Image (cartoon, rainbow, N blue to C red):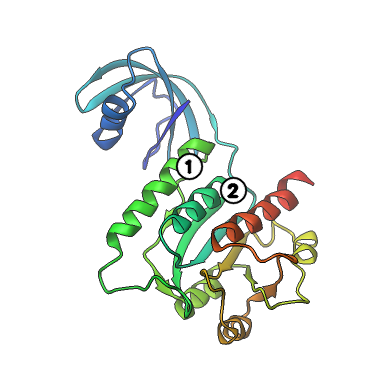
Amino acid sequence: MTRLFLDEAIPKTQETWEITGDSARYLNDVLRMRVGEELILCDIDRIDHVCSIVSSAKGLVAVSIRDRHPNGNEPKFSATVYQGLAKGERMDLSIQKSVELGASRYVPTACSRSIVKIKSGGKEGKTDRWQAIALEAARQCGRGIVPEVTPPIDLKTALSDAKENCDLVLFPWEEEKEGSLGKILSSLDFEKHPKIGIFIGPEGGFAEEEAKMAEEMGAKLVTLGKRILRTETAAPAVLAMLVYHSELL
């Protein structure tokens, strides 16, 4: 069912709602939805409102609310993915799959081996497109929020951000042999430590000095197994492990 996200709350007593702006144009011009068709409005309180269209005109779609319930699709953890800047479709795929697997925030991160470089004022368009990818992924998988995609930052700034905002910072590195992600997750209390940062290297991986800096700033160096994953595969792989340990055991 079509899902739209609202940046406001719908009062519990509300029986109808008017959709305007870009969302109305999306329903009318892109999806070509008609009177009688159903959709879900997810408001800022993460309440899913099951609605049916009662009228539709240019720039305005009116719906009748026939059911409402809390969205139950958000994970127990809040994960920020600090993704090393990668080329083209690799970033797109990483964002899409990370959102599907529960990431709540996505931070493109410039690393020493990133082929793509940050240019002053040059990534705004990219960030808007990446945010649009996150929105579509959130719609597709029934999320209760649209994860934020931030403008790119450098690795040191990203590590400082993670140290300040995360309870646990994971730093997968292909040269790490001892740190076991499985052991960390098997003993992790997701209720006490719900905020998790995940650092992923670009195509060439992290340099040794970057791994040392991460460790000095409190990150845990971990291995993801015997195989070296592509940059667009690594974040979804870690998130899948988090989902398994927090929801499926």
Picture residue at 40% right of the left edge, 16% below the top = 37
**69 relative to 178 in the view: left or right:** left
**195 relative to 32 in the view: left or right:** right
Crowding near the residue tagged with mark 1, few <14, some 14–19, many ≥20 C-alpha atoms within 10 Å: many
Among the 4 quarters of the image, the one containing residue 120: bottom left
Is 43 located above or below residue 178 in the figure? above
Picture residue at 28% right of the left edge, 23% below the top = 61
Q: Earlier in the sequence, mark 1 or mark 2?
A: 2
Q: Position of residue 211 (x, y in %)?
A: 60, 81
Kindly identify which residue carries mark 1.
138
Q: Position of residue 28 (x, y in %)?
A: 27, 25
**Mark 1, secondary structure of its residue:** helix
Q: Position of residue 113 (x, y in %)?
A: 48, 77
The amino acid type found where label 1 is placed reads Ala
Disc number placed over residue 101 in the picture, else none: 2
Q: CA distance from mark 1 to mark 2?
A: 10 Å
The amino acid type found where label 2 is placed reads Leu
Disc number placed over residue 210 in the picture, else none: none
Number of numbered discs overlaid on the protein picture: 2
Is 140 located above or below residue 54 in the figure? below
Among the 4 quarters of the image, the one containing residue 175: bottom right
